Image (tube, helix red, strand yellow):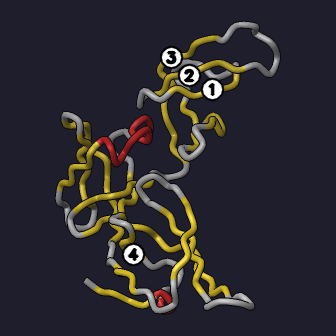
């Protein structure tokens, strides 16, 4: 366990605070005309992607934790957990559904993700921003107007709004962060 003073922290540091592992995105020293100075930190929870601010005293000690980033390749769903292959050491890694959440809608065999590890535990998985996926079915939303849209089901079971000209069998580029259609490939 490595503890450091708040004034020694720099953006990009990973800390344990209030029982959670958090990423320090920004830290600034605030000096007021009256009262002692303090540090205002912007923290991000990598599991929920929630960002929030906290104030710290300059001499307050914080636990710094070492995390590692690894590249994983998705293999398949095993029960309620997702099985990945660690590309660097060729070990299999099971990741619980609670960590993957709704990103599972974009997982297919061979997709490479970035995972954050604390020890041997995965606590965050990041998909590539763009994926090319096959359209397996489409549902018209009615109307048939020019510039209209319809819902397409993809090979990964994700559903996404697409333009009217997209048909079954098309491969489309999808933004996984915003669940958006980008273009037909």
Label 2 near label 3: C-beta < 8 Å? yes
Q: Which mark is residue 15?
A: 4
Q: Position of residue 161 (x, y in %)?
A: 63, 26
Q: Residues within 10 Å of mark 2 (few under 14, many from 20)?
A: many
Q: Which mark is residue 133?
A: none
| Quadrant where the image shows the C terminus | top right
Q: Is residue 22 above or below residue 57?
A: above
Q: Along the polypeptide, which appears first: circle 4 or circle 1? A: 4
Q: Which residue is mark 2?
A: 152
Q: Along the polypeptide, which appears first: circle 2 or circle 4? A: 4
Q: For residue 104, what is the image quadrant?
A: top left
Q: Which residue is mark 1?
A: 161
Q: Residues within 10 Å of mark 4 (few under 14, many from 20)?
A: many
Q: Position of residue 14 (x, y in %)?
A: 41, 75
Gap between marks 4 and 1, in whole Å? 39 Å
Gap between marks 1 and 3, in whole Å? 12 Å
Inspect this view and state whether residue 62 appears: yes
- The structure residue drawn at horizontal position 26% and vertical position 45%, both measured from the top left corner, is 96
Q: Nearer the viewer, residue 42 or 140?
A: 42
- The structure residue drawn at horizontal position 66% and vertical position 37%, both measured from the top left corner, is 183
Q: Along the polypeptide, which appears first: circle 1 or circle 3? A: 3
Q: Position of residue 178 (x, y in %)?
A: 60, 43
Gap between marks 3 and 2, in whole Å? 6 Å
Q: Which mark is residue 137?
A: 3
């Amino acid at each position: 366990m490595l503890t450091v003073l708040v004034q020694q922290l720099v953006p990009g540091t990973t800390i344990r605070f209030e029982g959670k592992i958090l990423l320090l995105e920004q830290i600034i020293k605030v000096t007021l005309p009256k009262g002692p100075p303090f540090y205002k930190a912007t923290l991000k929870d990598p599991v929920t992607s929630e960002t929030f601010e906290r104030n710290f005293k300059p001499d307050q000690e914080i636990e710094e934790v070492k995390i590692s980033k690894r590249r994983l390749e998705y293999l398949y769903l095993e029960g309620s957990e997702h099985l990945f292959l660690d590309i660097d050491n060729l070990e299999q890694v099971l990741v619980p559904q609670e960590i993957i959440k709704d990103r599972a809608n974009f997982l297919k065999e061979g997709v490479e993700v970035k995972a954050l590890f604390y020890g041997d535990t995965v606590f965050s998985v990041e998909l590539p921003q763009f994926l090319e996926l096959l359209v397996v079915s489409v549902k018209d939303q009615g109307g048939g107007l020019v510039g209209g849209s319809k819902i397409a089901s993809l090979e990964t079971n994700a559903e996404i709004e697409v333009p009217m000209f997209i048909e079954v069998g098309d491969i489309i580029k999808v933004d996984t962060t915003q669940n958006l259609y980008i273009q037909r490939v």
